[in-house]
Amino acid sequence: EAGVAQSPRYKIIEKRQSVAFWCNPISGHATLYWYQQILGQGPKLLIQFQNNGVVDDSQLPKDRFSAERLKGVDSTLKIQPAKLEDSAVYLCASSLDVPPLHFGNGTRLTVT
Amino acid sequence: AQTVTQSQPEMSVQEAETVTLSCTYDTSESDYYLFWYKQPPSRQMILVIRQEAYKQQNATENRFSVNFQKAAKSFSLKISDSQLGDAAMYFCAYRSAHRGSNYKLTFGKGTLLTVNP
């Protein structure tokens, strides 16, 4: 089966600019996750979708971050405006109701 | 809230030797899953091994095995016959089995494993 696809692989932007990341989960996986991984730390959940509905966005900085999953398939995570502390790897994962999670290769964001 | 602690930021092992990575967790739940993920420089998180809390038998996957101590809330990973390709960041992760938790996966901070030739 094809894995979780993410793009772009790398992105460099200046602070206050906007950026968007795209994720296509494994076919048939109803649950999609966006994680933020700051250098030297474990991934932190930003938002979790079940089909096209949000089930957990408690750690999403909603003043600057937004995410959507139209039609319950692929998803977009946006940051606007970006801050220096947003520099991180953004990981997308998907799963069935039962574990495990399957991860994409991530997008490395650098904010200068 | 569940927490996962990996007390070893870095570990090193000689090729062909055995190494054990530690992980402890805190939960009030009785039913859950535990995982070890490997993250090489390519950044992709790769599942190494999983353990269901209701199973007493320790999980094994080829050279990888776990020591699951439910009462002590400990979940260590043993890598036998270490290979150069095992060098990576290793993350311990916890996932509730209860639907009300939304099956959220909580990670530790990771252990960087170096394999010396």
Image (cartoon, coloured by chain):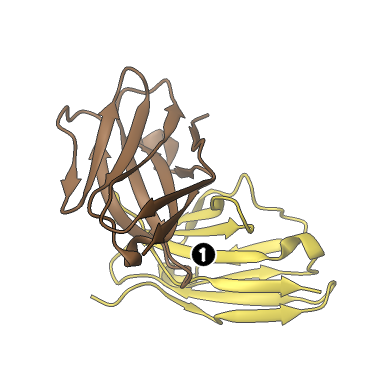
Image quadrant containing the N terminus of chain A: bottom left
Residue B77: give x, y in percent of width and height.
32, 42
Residue A30 appears in the figure:
no
Say which residue appears at 34% left-offset and 33% top-offset: B75
Marked residue chain, label 1: A
Could you say which is closer to the camera, residue B66 or residue A27?
B66
Q: B13 and A56: which one is in front?
A: B13
For residue A109, side relative to residue B51 (left or right)? right
Q: Amino acid at mark 1?
A: Leu
Residue A52 screen position, x and y as percent: 46, 62
Q: Which chain is yellow?
A: A
Relative to B19, A46 lies left or right: right
SS type, badge 1: strand
Which image quarter holds the C terminus of chain A?
A: bottom right
Residue at coordinates 32% horizontally, 73% vertically from top-left?
A: A3
Q: Front-most of A71 and B17? A: B17
Q: Position of residue B87 (x, y in %)?
A: 40, 61
Q: Is residue A59 left or right of residue B93?
A: right
Quick check: can you spot residue A65? yes
Depicted B96 relative to depicted A45: above or below: above
